[in-house]
Amino acid sequence: MEESLNRKREVLSVRQEKPDEKPDAKRNEKPEDSLYQNGGKEVSAGRPEDAPEKKGPGEEQDPDSFRPFGVRDTDIRSYSPLALAFLGDGIYSAVIRTLVVEKGNRQAAKLHREASVLVCAEAQAKVGDAIFSDLTEEEAAAYRRGLNSHPSHPSRSADIHDYMKATALETLVAWLYLTDQEERMLGLINDGLTKTKLI
């Protein structure tokens, strides 16, 4: 399970290439040594020992702390549920695509069809229903924010109730991601897919 989680983290992480660097040098480089630009200064991709601990939601964030790509830490409560669902949709899709590819190398069209079955609103609604009783109070609150959102353009191909539950699951996935709870996020997705026998 730990090895699978590490592979998923690698898939979800993004490394910025240096244009003047040779490909062979990249292969021998350790992840802790890689650098990216952050607000005009170079920062190690690994967490330095003297870096401040990331605070949880609702706790005061250090104004000088940054997320990768120069994005300031922001109070997640300031994001609308639909903005969180937008982010969560991409994260959930990446996790599902990783699971599909890990089953074995196949033609891209077959991979797409298999992933589409798992990321549709109906499947996401089933996963959300399956894990709801396992959520903490904070996680359930994030899920309910998505469930109570009011999308201006609901899907024509999906039942509105399934669509809202899918939006709720995507909101939860983004909330867990933005609060640095990727392991919990992956565990919940795995539990939901297993309980619903989708995988």
Image: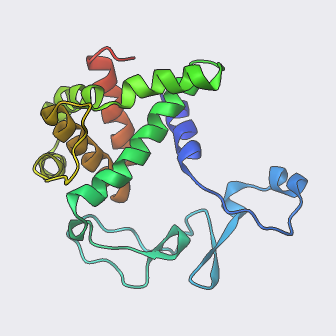
Residue 168 screen position, x and y as percent: 20, 44
Which sits in the foreground, 90 or 143?
90
Residue 67 screen position, x and y as percent: 47, 70
Let me know if residue 176 appears in the view. Answer: yes
Which sits in the foreground, 44 or 18?
18
Let me know if residue 102 appears in the view. Answer: no
Which sits in the foreground, 108 or 53?
108
Residue drawn at point x = 52 percent, y = 39 percent: 8
Task: Describe the colour scheme in one phrase.
Answer: rainbow
Query: Could you tell whether 96 is left or right of 43 in the image?
Result: left
Query: Could you tell whether 8 is left or right of 93 in the image?
Result: right
Query: Could you tell whether 149 is left or right of 22 in the image?
Result: left
Query: Could you tell whether 146 is left or right of 18 in the image?
Result: left
Residue drawn at point x = 34 percent, y = 42 percent: 185
Residue 22 screen position, x and y as percent: 89, 60
Q: Using the image, determine if residue 26 lies above or below residue 108.
A: below
Q: Using the image, determine if residue 43 lies above or below residue 93.
A: below
Number of numbered labels in the structure image: 0
Q: Quadrant of residue 49?
A: bottom right
Residue drawn at point x = 21 percent, y = 33 percent: 128
Residue 190 screen position, x and y as percent: 36, 28
Q: Quadrant of residue 106?
A: top right
Considering the image in quadrants, where does the C terminus appear?
top left
Q: Residue furthest top?
A: 197
Q: Residue furthest front?
A: 156
